[in-house]
Image (cartoon, rainbow, N blue to C red):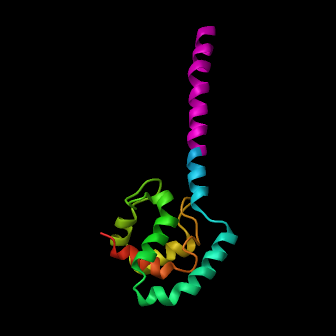
C-alpha cells in the first residue's frame, strides 16, 4: 500500500500541475484577447474619426484587421478554429442575423458578448465573405 500511495503521488502531482498550467494558459489566452474598456473607448473614438474614409475605400482590409485582432486569439490566426470553432464554417452555415445575435449576446460560456464593440453587422457581413 505504501508503494501505491507513493506511485499516486509521483504520477498524480505532476499530472495535476500540468492540468492547472494548461488551464492557466488557456485562460491567459482568452483574457489577452479581450481589451479593457478604456482601450475599447479609445479605439471606438478613433474608428469614428476614420469611418468616412474607410467606407469610401470599402473597409475590407480594416474589417479583416479588426476580426484578426479581436477573434484570432480563440478562433485561430486563420480563423479556421482553435479554442473556438471555425469562423469560416460559421460564416457559411449561419445567417447574418444569427451571427449578429452571437456577437451581441455571446454563446455559451466560451464566447463572451460585446467583443465586436458596435460593429456586429459589419463583422457578420465580413464573416459571410470568408471561404
Residue 47: percent from left, percent from top: 56, 81
Which image quadrant: the N terminus? top right
Compared across the picture, whether 42 is left or right of 63 comes to right
- Residue at image coords 68%, 70%: 37
Residue 33: percent from left, percent from top: 56, 60
Count of all numbered marks drawn on residues in the image: 0
- Magenta stretch: helix, strand or loop mostly: helix
Q: Which residue is at the far right? A: 38
* Residues rendered magenta in the picture: 1-24
Residue 129: percent from left, percent from top: 33, 76
Q: Is residue 43 above or below residue 13?
A: below
Which image quadrant: the C terminus? bottom left
Q: Is residue 111 above or below residue 18?
A: below
Q: Is residue 38 above or below residue 79?
A: below
**Quadrant of the image occupied by residue 115:** bottom right
In the image, residue 129 lies in the stretch drawn in magenta = no
Q: Which residue is at the far top? A: 2
Q: Is residue 33 above or below residue 22?
A: below
- Residue at image coords 56%, 52%: 29
Amino acid at each position: 500500500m505504501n508503494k501505491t500511495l507513493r506511485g499516486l503521488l509521483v504520477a498524480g502531482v505532476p499530472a495535476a500541475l500540468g492540468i492547472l498550467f494548461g488551464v492557466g494558459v488557456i485562460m491567459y489566452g482568452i483574457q489577452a484577447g479581450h481589451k479593457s474598456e478604456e482601450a475599447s473607448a479609445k479605439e471606438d473614438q478613433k474608428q469614428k474619426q476614420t469611418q468616412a474614409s474607410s467606407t469610401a475605400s470599402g473597409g475590407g482590409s480594416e474589417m479583416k484587421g479588426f476580426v484578426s485582432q479581436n477573434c484570432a486569439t480563440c478562433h485561430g490566426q486563420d480563423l479556421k478554429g482553435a479554442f473556438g470553432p471555425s469562423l469560416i464554417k460559421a460564416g457559411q452555415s449561419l445567417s447574418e442575423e444569427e451571427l449578429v445575435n452571437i456577437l451581441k449576446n455571446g454563446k455559451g460560456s466560451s464566447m463572451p458578448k460585446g467583443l465586436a464593440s458596435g460593429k456586429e453587422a459589419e463583422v457578420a457581413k465580413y464573416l459571410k465573405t470568408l471561404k
